[in-house]
């Protein structure tokens, strides 16, 4: 879970909360109750985070509705945002070397 919290900048408590409210998010758990997220889980988490943070939709029901009505578009926008942020971070790193 720690890797996912670092990847998404979300606290573990938020991830656990979302697991209860989004049936699409079901990480595998081992006998010690450690969570293992798939790439699909991480993509879903990023989509929900994008809707919540960028589109400013905060109610769980409203987020679920947004996911249903625009499943592909939200995912595409989130992936585009991730790519742009990655490019920005690389450029900042290059600039610091100059």
Image: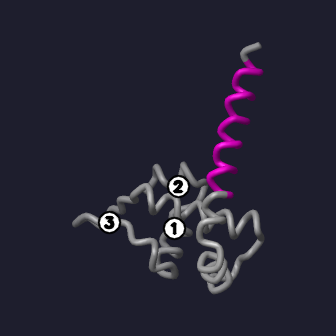
x, y (%) of residue 2? 46, 52
Seen at 66% across and 65% down, the residue is: 73
In this rendering, would 84 be left or right of 43?
right
In this rendering, would 56 be left or right of 14?
right
Q: Which stretch appears magenta? A: 77-96
Q: Give whichever of 17, 44 is nearer the camera.
A: 44
The quadrant of the rendering that contains the N terminus is bottom left
Closer to viewer: mark 2 or mark 3: 3
Residue 13 inside the magenta-drawn segment: no
Q: Which residue is mark 3?
A: 28
Q: Indicate the secondary structure of the residue bearing disc 3.
A: strand
In this rendering, would 8 be left or right of 50?
left
Q: Which residue is mark 1?
A: 15
Q: Which residue is mark 2?
A: 5
Q: Indicate the secondary structure of the residue bearing disc 2.
A: helix
Q: Earlier in the sequence, mark 2 or mark 3?
A: 2
């Amino acid at each position: 879970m720690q890797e996912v919290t670092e990847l998404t900048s979300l606290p573990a408590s938020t991830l656990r909360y979302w697991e209860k409210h989004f049936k699409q998010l079901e990480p595998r758990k081992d006998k010690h109750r450690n969570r293992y997220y798939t790439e699909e889980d991480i993509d879903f988490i990023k989509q929900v985070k994008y809707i919540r943070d960028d589109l400013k939709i905060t109610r769980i029901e409203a987020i679920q509705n947004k996911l249903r009505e625009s499943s592909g578009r939200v995912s595409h926008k989130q992936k585009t945002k991730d790519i742009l942020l990655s490019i920005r971070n690389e450029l900042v790193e290059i600039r610091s070397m100059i």
